[in-house]
Image: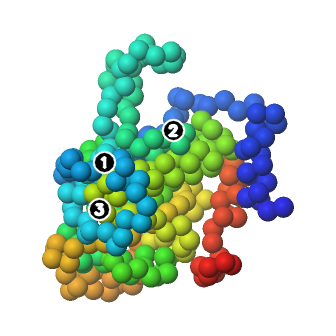
Amino acid sequence: MSVAQQYADAVMWRSRVQMEPVDFSPNWRDKPRKAKYFPGTDLLPLPAGDYPPDASVDRGLAPDPGPGAPFTLPLVGGMLRDSYGLVARRLAVQANTDLSSLPAYQEANWSRGAASGGGLYPVSVYWAAGPGGPLLPGVYHYSPNRHGLERLLTGDVSGQVRQAVGGADTDQFLVLGVQIWQNSYKYNSFSYHVATMDTGALLQTWRMWAGARGLVADPVLWFDEPRLTGLLGVDPDQEAVLAVVPLHWAPEAAAGSATTATAGAAAGTPRVRRADAGKSKVRLTFDLVQDVHRATVPAGPRPGPGA
């Protein structure tokens, strides 16, 4: 039986057989930030998007949307804000034990638009932008707290992402990473399950949001993950890349240039060298979590139909 199957069985039977470690208790005094933070980076504010009257749930759930209309910067900004931006502050009367502390700003509990799969800490959304879009080519991190893009790297690296996913007819990609250790602070070895569920909830939200506007946001789930973690400059045992979403872009919206992109990549294989400013002193790891993720990293080319 594979490691992934053993983990899936442990998740399914956890109500009868507790997952190890059974005596785990979160150390909330050392809790992580809820989102990555890169101090000193340039921030590009994103537009909030709009709400066209024909963008209905029925249209978002309709099958076979066709090739899809091209994305624009306001559309990407709207999709990110409505799914993962901080869109509401929770002050409603409820039965949770933290109710008395919620009115204090430092203890405020903010909600995001995507239905959570159970992950306490959100997916890290990166935008790998080539010269065919509205941004200076490079790698950006979406800051849900400020609804903007933090520039992590300048230079066209979209070719690396395109090779990692096995080809795509665009140079604009949203790359989804998960710091699994963050969720381990609460969920220990169960964290990989909730983190991947949260990623699925976000992807389906994007599909519905985009489909309601005649767009396509279909994820690629089989790709060269080591190439992407190397590009993002992250430890693959601490942060996993779980999906890549190519964005079809309108050519006339391009603001970058091939000259800029070539210059940015001329010094060798570029990668992000900025690290987020975490506040946790200890990063918990669990062997089961690391083993199951290593087992799910694709090896070799994408299998053909029926394989």
Left or right placement of residue 67 versus residue 204 in this view = left
Q: Which mark is residue 214?
A: 3
Kind of residue at disc 3: Gly
| 267 versus 111 height, above or below | below
Q: Residues within 10 Å of mark 2 (few under 14, many from 20)?
A: some
The residues tagged by marks 2 and 1 sit, at their Cα atoms, a distance apart of 29 Å
Residue drawn at x 45%, y 55% as measured from the top left: 203
The kind of residue tagged 1 is Ser
Left or right of 205, for residue 23: right
**Residue 110 coordinates in the image, percent (x, y):** 37, 32
Indicate which label's residue lies in the foreground, 2 or 3. 3
- Amino acid at dot 2: Leu
Decide if residue 132 is on the left or right side of residue 307: left
Q: Say which quadrant the N terminus sits in.
A: bottom right
For the point 76% across and 38% down, the residue is 14
Badge 1 or badge 3: first in the primary sequence: 1
Q: At x 49% / y 48%, what residue is drawn?
A: 201
User: Closer to the observer: label 2 or label 1?
Assistant: 1
| Mark 2 lies on residue | 120
How many C-alpha atoms fall within 10 Å of the one at disc 3: few (<14), some, or many (≥20)? some
CA gap, disc 2 and disc 3: 31 Å
* In the rendered image, the vertical position of residue 97 relative to residue 124, given as above or below: above
Quadrant position of residue 66: bottom left
Disc 3 element: loop
The residue identified by callout 1 is: 56
Name the element at disc 2.
Answer: loop
